[in-house]
Image (cartoon, rainbow, N blue to C red):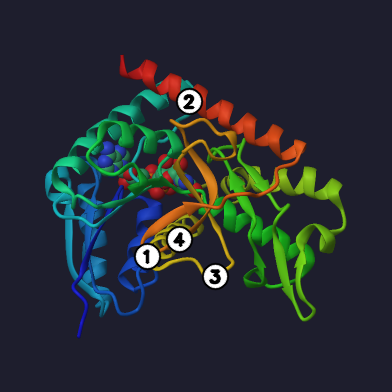
Amino acid sequence: MAKDPVRVLVTGAAGQIGYALVPMIARGVMLGPDQPVILHMLDIEPAAEALNGVKMELIDAAFPLLRGVVATTDAIEAYKGVDIAIMVGGFPRKEGMERKDVMSKNVSIYKAQASALEQHASPNCKVLVVANPANTNALILKEFAPSIPEKNITCLTRLDHNRALGQISERLQVHFGDVKNVIIWGNHSSTRYPDVNHATVGTSAGLKPVKELVGDDNWLNTKFIATVQQRGAAIIKARKLSSALSAASSACDHIHDWVLGTPKGTWVSMGVYSDGSYGIQPGLIYSFPVTCEKGEWKIVQGLKIDEFSRGKMDATAKELMEEKSLAYSCLN
Ligand SMILES: NC(=O)c1ccc[n+]([C@@H]2O[C@H](COP(=O)([O-])OP(=O)(O)OC[C@H]3O[C@@H](n4cnc5c(N)ncnc54)[C@H](O)[C@@H]3O)[C@@H](O)[C@H]2O)c1
């Protein structure tokens, strides 16, 4: 029997990530090839015409799984009954703007989105925040949508996770599908910490530690980390635009694994509400290694953390605490 359609909202859908993301969702990349979807797309008034253009293209593409499209600038209509919300809409940093000004714009956007989410989305709606500052936007959503379970509000660090897999696979000349269990700790910012201490590569002789195969701790602790941390900036330099197709694809991976589960023995990175695991203070949305089963994520426990990692994990937590107080100062 055919499944009932799932309602998926994409905010900022007229933007560049939105344009890459909505066809992936409509093709079943996010929720599977047998899951029909109804797409809800929200943007703001100046982008209304472009948004309508995206809707026209979705209709023209005649996606078999697409059972309806709502394209609107009205938040109530956009959030009505959605099961999954992917928040891509936000205010980008423009030249000459102070960090506080960008934060202030986004805090007010995410406070408003929180109330629309709470009042109109399905009560068990799963939320993925993509727009930057992603962790802090997600935290604001969580704080102002208290009736949505906190475990349902997450942010995207899967792009960083996938970037780490990509760098290791390039270095070792193996397919990225054979590399697993890298970790992104912390903030989706330049302080993110890509950790390969527990990562492995599937080889003909079985699973081998990435550290052993690379055999160059200096590269892992310097160049590798810096490349992953600065990859977004490198893409902007090359494309004159920020990453869009990889962000869209990683957003699909994030929701796919959350809803459909992670393969046995594999974890992924997700920005989730800290429960104090690994000494990260509760009250932050922090990226952890998680496994997912039956639509629920769980932080991987018991990993050994060495002194080098501890320092990096604490530094990115400290930045998140500073962002949180900046966000709160914008609310006053
Ligand atoms: N977490 C990640 O891994 C990651 C990766 C890449 C980009 N990003 C972030 O994703 C966001 C979107 O990137 P993009 O390249 O698509 O930007 P973009 O400027 O092309 O698109 C953003 C869209 O959001 C819309 N928007 C603005 N305010 C809105 C609101 N209040 N409600 C609904 N829509 C609104 C804009 O009109 C625009 O269409 C940016 O914040 C970017 O920094 C995050």
Q: Quadrant of residue 283?
A: top left
Residue at position x 71%, y 40% in the image: 309
Q: Looking at the rendered structure, which numbered label has been put on residue 121?
A: none
At 14% from the left edge and 51% from the top edge, which residue is drawn?
A: 80
Pointer 2: residues within 10 angstroms few (<14), some, or many (20+)? Answer: many
Q: Which residue is mark 1?
A: 294
Mark 3 residue's CB less than 8 Å from ligand 1 = no
- State the CA–CA distance, disc 4 to disc 3: 10 Å
Q: Amino acid at mark 3?
A: Lys
Kind of element beneath mark 4: strand
Q: Which residue is mark 4?
A: 292
Residue matched to label 2: 323
Q: Earlier in the sequence, mark 1 or mark 3?
A: 3
Q: Tell which circle, 4 or 3, labels the residue nearer the N-terminal end.
A: 3
Give residue 292's position: percent from left, percent from top.
45, 60
Identity, as a three-letter code, of the amino acid under mark 1:
Lys
- 2 with respect to 97 (left or right): left
Badge 3 crowding class, 10 Å Cα cut-off, few under 14, some 14 to 19, many 20 or more, is: few
